[in-house]
Amino acid sequence: MIENFPEIIFEDENYIVINKPAGLIVHGAPGINDVTLADLLIAKYPDIAEVGEDKLRPGIVHRLDKDVSGLMVIAKNNETFNHLKSQFKERDVNKTYLALVHGKIEKDYDEWGETFCKECKKEAKNKENKRSKRKPILLKALMIRR
């Protein structure tokens, strides 16, 4: 199983940065029988099974969908897990996504703001919560080649 471990981009005593390939499920759930990243982590780092708040997500503070590839940060201890979790919650982590699109693209450049986020829409409708602590979400799309 360990021979299928994703490429390690960086590792120290506190965390691992891996390049999750498309097709790899991050963690188990009812009905999932495939090997997951969580399974691979426990096989390679048995102590990581005790890291985090959920045994199905050892050391995992964020996820990428099965069909998405990209870098993931995995905590190797609870102190780092809590620190990373806080950074993701407060949106101190900058995430960059690259999407390959095929078909008719009408604009060479576009931006989307808070209306993209379901939770942000709910907060905007809630008159008591006009000043959200949530940092703004900004998505930008740029046509690279036609």
Image (tube, rainbow, N blue to C red):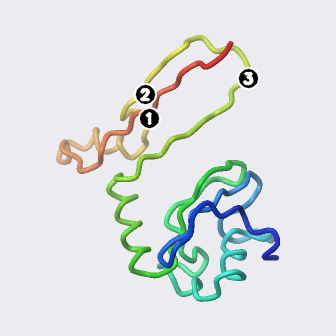
Marks 2 and 1: CB-CB under 8 Å?
Answer: yes
Q: Position of residue 64 (x, y in %)?
A: 61, 54
Residue for badge 1: 116
- N-terminal-most mark, 3 or 2: 3
Q: Secondary structure at mark 2?
A: strand
Residue at point 80% right, 68% down? 4
Marks 3 and 2: CB-CB under 8 Å?
Answer: no
Residue for badge 2: 112
- Does 106 appear above or below 113? above
Residue for badge 3: 102
- N-terminal-most mark, 3 or 1: 3
Instruction: Choose between 85 and 80: the one closer to the eye.
Output: 80
In the image, what residue type sits under mark 3?
His
**Quadrant where the C terminus is found in the figure:** top right
Residue at point 69% right, 26% down? 101
The answer to whether residue 26 is left or right of residue 94 is: right
In the image, what residue type sits under mark 1?
Phe
